[in-house]
Amino acid sequence: MVIPEEHTLIYDGTFDGFLTGVFHIYELKLQTVIFQKPENLQESLFGNKVEITTDLEKADRVWKGIKSKTSAKGSYRLYSAFLSEQPQIETLLLKYIQQAFKSSRPIDSDFSNETVLKVSQIAKSVGREKHRMEAFVRFRLTNDGIYFASVEPDFDVLPLISKHFKSRYADQKWIIYDLKRGYGLYYDLEKVELMQLSLPEGFDATKTKSDYFTASELEFQTLWQDYFESTNIASRKNMKLHVQHVPKRYWKYLSEKLR
Amino acid sequence: MSFERTQEKLKILADAAKYDVSCASSGSNRSNTNKGLGDATGMGICHSYTEDGRCVSLLKILLTNYCIFDCAYCVTRKSNDIKRAAFQVQEVVDLTINFYRRNYIEGLFLSSGIFKSADYTMERLVAVAKKLRLEENFNGYIHLKSIPGASDELMKEAGLYADRLSVNIEIPTKEGLKLLAPEKNREDFIKPMIKVKNEIIQYQSEKKIIKSTPKFAPAGQSTQMIIGASGESDQQIMWTSNYFYKKFNLKRVYYSGYIPISYDSRLPQIGTDVPMLRENRLYQTDWLMRFYGFEVHEILNNEHQNLDLDVDPKLGWALRNMDFFPVDVNKADKLMLARIPGLGMKSVYKIIQARQFRKLNWDHLKRMGVALNRAKYFLVCDSRDFERRDLTGPQLKSIILQNSTSKYQTILSPQLNLFG
Ligand code: SF4
């Protein structure tokens, strides 16, 4: 009996890196595979280690292949699920891709298939986080004339919200910065780019200090807070429902909650 | 803009506007043009939620709360002793733009008390929308209240700049209106509605020929009724609603449980509970009419003038029509699936897609997230296991209520999952 050798693919954690890995799996006909990122590489691994160098061309070929075997929704779900950063998400997605390639028709509406179901559930929670960010981002106008917002999303959703903000705020410069992952989106009136900031020491994202923000910024925050308070109808108060819609972990970035 | 004065006005005029429940900002198709500000193509986002769990998506304010009318159910009524204020057109524009740029809101919902005359008021509402569109190149969402009695010309202009127009009919019956707002008559509400409806129809036919026809109220019209202020039955409310949906192609009708605001003897007294559960049942019925293929008379008729409070209207209908069940999920068409209690439209679509791959059994349904606790009594699937007892409606009702006490005893808000 031949025991299939276990391969550990070490990749850079990007989606393109993952797709490049998938390319190798098919090219080398690898059987048992685990994906690992260099930062959480485990020492006691048996088997064969393969370092994957992200290759956009190969990634693109795989992505095109996936797209030809799934609906637009299906490939979007796959990408969203990847952004969940859940442990061993790569294994699940690989399984999904393998099944999609094997099947003669798109599997992504086969909701009684466990892999499909799991991917769509994870994609759904990522989608929920995306919507929350689109709703809960609060811009503040900096002294440089840039509308700045900081966030700490549960999943890596900035790539998913870029288009939404670009088409909405086409005539203002803005930055949406993910404090947790240390990168942001910057729109310069032309295009959106990824960027990294070296935030000043002791920078508190929840404070609106005049060192960074315009004088009128606090006034608008106050007006908005007033507005928010006056929308409440006391005889209908239901805090449980409120917290269900606006979970407490998001409060520190919401201007209306900073009183 | 003087900060203190604006602050004072905003407090008064937001407070006065909050009783208008409509918060919808979806249904439009206005996209960003010429790299301007904003985009109203999507679903409409709730940017926050009030402490009673309602969606905050628009800056909802009155232009003024001065009013020459004295409608008993309204806080703004002339005889009420409250602080009054009025915004300048430019103030509303500045607030809207600055809130929008900070991603606080999807747009503006502007209503007003009637000062001087209907046209005078409507003219100012239109001026705000016009300024936002033409001077600020604003493509966010604008909802304007049509002031009852406003002229056709003004309504036409309003539609060119607003995404949605609405007239609140407020009181579901003519008799109720006579009692509570004797100075108003129903024709005044209906006239602007007809105008807007006709303009929308005309826009749609012209659009087919000339692509560049300016948009006319792309998110349509809506209205609101106050529930529980004039002793009306659910049947009267929903038949009125159905009439307005059909006759004026309304996009939405909103139902707002009356919040006691005065000691007027014609109205429920202060301290009376807001009929929230009833409100929720009405929204559910509205949903059944619009998305589930139900006719209003199937749910409310002379034998059934009021909705059950202990079960939702779909379950109520099923219990009165047991001969329609059980439904076979592997065969039934969409409309029949949609009638199974406990099944939302999302589940219906999932079932239709998934059953092309294989016959579905209980396990499949469960894994797909179909809520079976109620549905299981009403369906059969690829399994020999199903409800065999020949239960009558009342028997089944008591079984279901026993198994889900908590769910039916908590008071639901209208914005909760309607058929969760
Ligand atoms: S006309 Fe409108 S604002 Fe004035 S009292 Fe009547 S309902 Fe209120």
Image (cartoon, coloured by chain):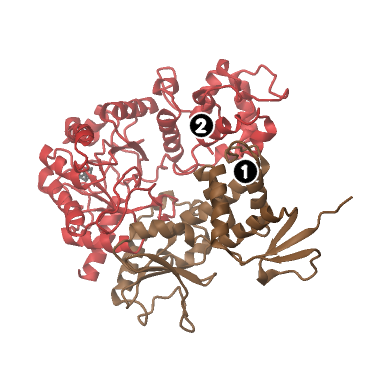
Which residue appears farthest toward the front when viewing the image?
A: A27
* Residue B312 - label: 2
Q: In this view, does A110 lie above or below B271?
A: above
Helix, strand or loop at label 2? It is: loop
Pinpoint the chain carrying mark 1.
A
| Ligand 1 lies under 8 Å from the Cβ of mark 1 | no
> Residue B85's spot in the image, x, y percent?
19, 58
| Ligand 1 lies under 8 Å from the Cβ of mark 2 | no
Which quarter of the figure has residue B22? top left
Task: Say which of A49 and B29 sits in front.
Answer: A49
Pinpoint the chain carrying mark 2.
B
- Disc 2 crowd, CA 10 A, few/some/many (<14, 14-19, 20+): many
Which mark is nearer the camera, 2 or 1?
Answer: 1
Q: Which amino acid does label 1 sit on?
A: Ala
Q: Is residue B327 above or below residue B349?
A: above
Q: Is A251 situated left or right of B111 in this image?
A: right
